[in-house]
Amino acid sequence: MVKRIYRLLLGGIVILSFFFPQRLLNAKTQSPLHPSKVFELKNMDINNVELPITNYGVYGQNAAGTAGAIWPKGSGCAYIFGAGMWIGAIVEGEKRVTQGYNPLNGWSEFMPGPPEHNADHAANASSHPEDRLLFSTEPADTAVWPLIRIDTVNAHIETTKVYLSDQDVYCEYNDMWQEQHEETSPLGITVTQLAFAWNAPMNNNIAFIMYIFKNTTSHTLKDMYVGADADMDIGYADDDLVGLDILRSLGYTYTTGQESGWGYPPPYYVGFRFLQGPKASDTVYVGGATGWDDPTGA
């Protein structure tokens, strides 16, 4: 039985407007998985975006359970209340879904590290420190950096550690611990996640996330769907508007009102763009949902 690996490249946190550092007023809170020695949350902060990232599938939400994804960095002006990938498939005739982030309660159904570490993590929060987030900007993490390229030169082998950007963040997690699931059974997947960002003029307001999904069981995942779930709150959430540009695979949230305490006039934007996925082996249908404009005119 062939196990399939799905790769998604998601360019997110695209800030399209610029404003002065000011404080944020946002009263909504949740009770997420609190960071610990197992469930880790740290900030990507190499460029203008201060993005909370975790080793259990959630990003954008801070450790207090309130909105994160701060722009500009250090300003307290937040754009995302919480986000994560959702994966759904049919397993042996049963529909199953794994949530990277539940917008109703902040929960994630993923466990840090590979499946064989799940029982240890559940029993002892200090087990397997190697399942932490690895930052390419931290010497202790680059010493054990797992992404390498092997080059054969002049009859000997040289290994080079691979980094994509000015700050890469690597982790692995899985959905194979039943106690972590709120409704359905696990799909049986392991996720390799690589977030990365540059601090150059052309891309210093963008963060990228690449996911590799691997079926680590003996069963087949049929009719698999993957989607980016994001609760995007720009300051005061009740006046936010949303839009979708199918031709550019771009979803966005914006507000046209002045945010209280924000020192630059609206509009304010945050967008997610899907950049690359697995090549389809059959027909792909786009659109069809109520309220969408089909760009083909069909």
Image: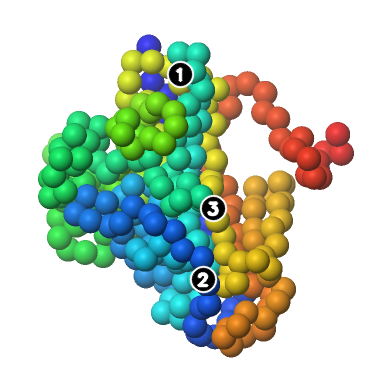
**Of marks 3 and 2, the one in the foreground:** 2
> In the displayed structure, does residue 245 sit left or right of residue 179?
right
- In contact (CB < 8 Å): disc 3 and disc 2: no
Q: Within the image, what quadrant is residue 252 found in? A: bottom right
- Circle 3 packing at 10 Å, graded few (<14), some (14-19), many (20+), is some
Mark 1 or mark 3, which has the lower sequence index? 1
Residue 112 placed where, x, y %? 27, 44
Disc 3, SS: strand
- Circle 2 packing at 10 Å, graded few (<14), some (14-19), many (20+), is few
Q: Which numbered disc covers residue 115?
A: none
- In contact (CB < 8 Å): disc 1 and disc 3: no
Residue drawn 44% across the image and 28% down it: 184
- The amino acid type of the residue labelled 3 equals Ala
Disc 1 designates what residue?
A: 91
Q: How is the image coloured?
A: rainbow
- The amino acid type of the residue labelled 2 equals Ala
Disc 2, SS: loop
182 shown above or below 24: above
Disc 2 designates what residue?
A: 27
Q: Is residue 210 visible?
A: no
Disc 3 designates what residue?
A: 230
Q: Disc 1 to disc 2, how far (Cα)?
A: 40 Å
Q: Disc 1 to disc 3, how far (Cα)?
A: 25 Å
Q: Is residue 53 visible?
A: yes
Residue 87 placed where, x, y %? 48, 35
Disc 1, SS: strand
For the N terminus, the quadrant is top left
Mark 1 or mark 2, which has the lower sequence index? 2
- The amino acid type of the residue labelled 1 equals Val
Which of the pair 95/129 is nearer the observer? 95
Mark 3 or mark 2, which has the lower sequence index? 2
